[in-house]
Image (cartoon, rainbow, N blue to C red):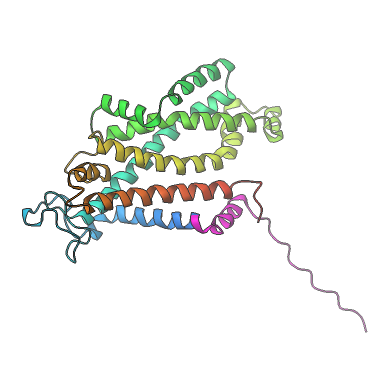
Amino acid sequence: MSAVAPALAPARQPETPLRRAWRRLRARKAAMFGLVVIVALVIIAVFAPLIAPFDPTRQSWAAVRKAPSALHWFGTDEVGRDLLSRIIYGTRASLAAGVVSVGIAVALGVPLGLLAGYGPRWIDTILSRITDAMLASPFLILAIALAAFLGPSLTNAMIAIGITATPIFIRLTRGQVLAVKVEDYVESARAVGNPRWRIAVKHILPNVMPQLLVQITLTIAMAVIAEASLSFLGLGQQPPAPSWGSMLNSAQRFLTNAPWMAIWPGIAIFITVLSFNLLGDGLRDAFDPRERG
C-alpha cells in the first residue's frame, strides 16, 4: 500500500507592519479604551446639534444654578444654560484645538526637522539653537504669551498652541532622521543617484512616521489642556460660545453653591486627556520593534 503524501499547507503570508501594530494595539485594553472614547468624542462633536437637548447659549432666569435633574442631567449654570448641552458643544472647541494646533505643529516641525537632520550642517546648527531656546520656555507660558499677543479667540489660541508645539516635532524628527539616514537602504538610494529631497521624502520620512504618530497623539492631549487653560484665562473660546475652560472660569465663583458647574467640565477634560494619553502609550508599544507577542 503506497503512502499518500500529505497535502502541502498553504504558505503563510508575511504580516505587514501595520497589521502587526494593530494586533498589538488590540491586545492592550487601556489603549483600546482610549480609542473608543476618542471615537465617541468625535461622534459627539460632529453630531452635537442632534445630541444636545438644549441650545447651549439659551439663558433661562427661571433655571439659574439648578442642580442635576431629569430635565437638566448636568444641572444649569449661573444664567440658566443647560450644562450638558454646553459640555457637548464644548467638545468641538477642545477637539478642534487639539487637532488643528497639532496639525500646525506637524506642518511646520516635520519639514524643519527633516531639513535639520538631513540638510547642511549650518542649517542644523541654526534650527537646533532656535529649538533649544523655545523648549527652554515652559510650554503653557509660551502659549499664553503668544495668545495674548495675537488676541483672544479660539483661532488665535490654536495658532499659539501650534507654534509652541512645533519645537517638539522638530527635535523628534531630527533625532529620528539622524538614526535612519545611516541605514543601508538610505545608502543604497544615495548610491543609485537619488537626489537628497527624494531620499528624505520617499525613504526617510515613511520610516519615522510611527514615532511621529505616537507624538501626535500625546501632543493632542497637551493641546486640549492648553486650550482649556487659555479659555479659562479669557484668551481662547470667547463667551457665550461653550468651552470647557471658560466653563471652569465661570464655575470658580460658585464652587460652594453649585459644585456641579465645575465637576462636569473637569471630568470632560480629564477623560479626554486620559484617553489620548492611553492611546499614545498603546501606540508606542505597538510600534516598538522590540516588543514581542
Inspect the magenta stretch and tell me whether residue 2 lies in it: yes
Segment colored magenta: 1-30
Quarter occupied by the N terminus: bottom right
Residue situated furthest left in the rendering: 62
* Residue toward you, 214 or 118: 214
Residue 273 horizontal/vertical position (percent):
39, 47
* Residue toward you, 30 or 35: 30
Q: Residue at x 48, y 57 (%)?
A: 32
Decide if residue 184 is on the left or right side of residue 116.
Answer: right
* Residue toward you, 136 or 289: 136
Quarter occupied by the C terminus: bottom right
Compared with residue 58, is residue 229 higher up or lower down, i.e. above or below? above
- Image quadrant where residue 220 sits: top left
Tell me if residue 3 can be seen. Answer: yes
Residue situated furthest bottom in the rendering: 1
- Image quadrant where residue 232 sits: top left
Residue 284 horizontal/vertical position (percent):
55, 46
Query: Looking at the magenta stretch, what is its main secondary structure?
Result: loop
Decide if residue 172 is on the left or right side of residue 72.
Answer: right
Compared with residue 130, is residue 74 higher up or lower down, i.e. above or below? below
Residue situated furthest top in the rendering: 122
Inspect the magenta stretch and tell me whether residue 238 lies in it: no
Residue 74 horizontal/vertical position (percent):
22, 58
Tell me if residue 108 can be seen. Answer: no
Q: Residue at x 69, y 35 (%)?
A: 185
* Residue toward you, 145 or 122: 145
Residue 152 horizontal/vertical position (percent):
23, 31
